[in-house]
Amino acid sequence: MFTHCNKTFILLLCVCYIYCDNASEIEYLKNLINEGTRQAENYQLRTDAKIHEANNDNIFQEYGTYDFVIIGGGTSGSVVASRLSELDFQVLLLEAGNFSNNGFEQFIRFAEPFHMYTDWNWGYKSVPQQFGCLGVVNESCLLPRGKGVGGNTLINDAIYSRGHPSNFDDWARIVDDASWSYDEVLKWFKKSENFHSSNSKARPAFSYHGTAGELNVQDRIPDTFLTDAFVRANEELGYHVTDMNKPSQIGTSIYQYYVSKTGRRQDFGNLFLKPHLKRTNLKVLTGSYVTNIVINPSTKRATGAVFTNAGRTYRVKAKLEVILSAGVIGSPQILMLSGVGPKKHLQQHGITVIEDLEVGSTLRDQLYVDLRFSSNINIPEESLDDQLKDYIKGIGTLTAPMVNQALGFYKINRPGSTPNVEVFSDLIAYSDGERRLMGFKPEIYEALWGSNNTHVSFVIENLLPKSTGTVRLKDNNPFEYPLIDPNVLAHHEDIDVLYQGIQFILRLAQTRAYQRLGLSYIANPLPPCRHLQFRSKQYWYCFIRQLSQSAFHPVGTCPMGASRRHGVVDSDLKVFGIKGLRVVDSSVFPTQISGHPDVAALMIAEKISEIIKSEHSSKTNGF
């Protein structure tokens, strides 16, 4: 029987254990943040992939034979590898990056811009632009793409946004295959989803969500005053709260994130692959950079791939299929280096043409601009220690990418019910680090801020731009980054959509909800636009051309089509004219969507994995 003294001593030990454990975790996490932000502010984006060059690229070593060789372990590739290895297929996944170690990248709050400046990003930039991104250094749009197992889910905002039903009905019409219609793909969205709602402001439509999948999807609490202001201001203009992932998408919605239940990043590599690495039929080979697909020119069959790893060059064979999931930039580059692409372009670089297809000819990217307002908001100081105490509990500001927990979808100058504009807001603060990380020229950044150092920012995103660009080889060296030209704002309607979006934000800022916060637009005229009347239509057009940036949602470089004249792959994502080769990632989108592409890329991976299993059903033993 314990004495009172013994009981008190044990209680103190328990309290000390909990407190000391939390204190050490807080110190560890604080060091992660401080070191992560410091490294990001000094990080130089790579300009090529020569880090992956072999010491002697003329000597091949054979790496064996697998049923499926999957190139790229990103958003789609990691899921395809997981699903195919559920059966008795021998699956090899080749990925240039690594698995996340839940370091600095676990903090979703620092997704933009800090996670862009790490080795988890390939570091792509566009060629200098003629019509947009003009206020960015060298007029080159930043185009971050996730490098590692999980792809973009290692660095993005983790927003669970599927798109509008009409987007997928359009796909079905374009490829002449009803299985791509919204009613048919909904089950593939729901398969991987495990949806929870705990925000009292949300209006979730549970029948459109899955609840038994691996991917935790939830709205975040607690709300903030900025969330409340955004929702109330929209209601004054007639836009009400809805579920951003149900068919009637127009209106405001509480954000839905695919984060863990404790608010930490949930990348697809750790989620879909890591739990299954003990499967003897699944091999994930990180640090593997694929230079080309091996295609027999006589039979036009893909038989394997060539890749580098740790300074050596290997060739691996595929018995059934090569599945290309290297992303919207990597997939067209690898296809063209393998002899599949525009005939004249390949011949210019001395590449033997195996199949003449318009690879890389239809790059589509969403574009955004932001407006910054001063306010009377008095933001209470919250120490990093206090934020981390909340973070450990799975709550607070570090468990979401933005202070505002709501966004809106709108239809501007467009018939029908499909939204073409997305708007969200956040609190941001002036810093030299932000300017460098976002890539703005110093004089543009200074004018954007005016005389203030803390702003309420509104982001206006054109979801369905009509401008198209290209991905082209720089030369036939696989370690050179390709030439990426999104050709932003080339179509005259795209700039007008953003202009109308700016007018909407100016009206929104005048609502009672925002006037209570004292919102006022006080930015200085941008230097390149000073010759124009401030806030005139001509000024805003100039403003948009200067401040427009990629929304980091490029798609469509290997699009689906009903025939080879209209696409690179068919509705089963098989490359036209090449046997045993598919492309499974966001490069196959035949159009942009009214949402964020990564969730649709996940849906595609789920759908095509089942098609592949069905086609190769001679191996049906469960694993």
Image (cartoon, rainbow, N blue to C red):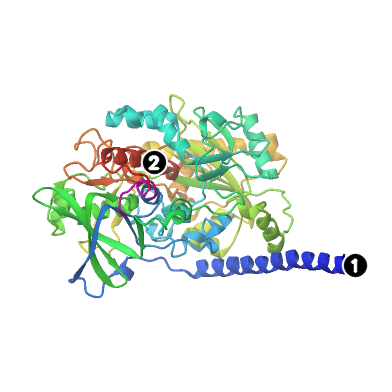
Residue 87 drawn in magenta: yes
Image coordinates for residue 14, horizontal then vertical, percent: 77, 65
Q: Secondary structure at mark 1?
A: loop
The quadrant in which residue 27 appears is bottom right
Q: Amino acid at mark 2?
A: Glu
Q: Amino acid at mark 1?
A: Thr
Residue identifier under label 1: 3
Residue drawn at x 40%, y 32% is 185
Q: Nearer the viewer, mark 1 or mark 2?
A: 1
Image coordinates for residue 10, horizontal then vertical, percent: 82, 67
Q: For this view, does 110 lie left or right of residue 284? A: right
Looking at the image, which is closer to me, 123 or 232?
123
Image coordinates for residue 229, horizontal then vertical, percent: 67, 39
Residue drawn at x 32%, y 63% is 288
Span shown in magenta = 82-91
Residue drawn at x 56%, y 41% is 256
Q: For this view, does 33 lie left or right of residue 128? A: right
Query: Is tag 1's residue or tag 2's residue first in the polypeptide sequence?
Result: 1
Label of residue 606 in the image: 2
Question: Residue reaching furthest left?
Answer: 298
The quadrant in which residue 564 appears is top left
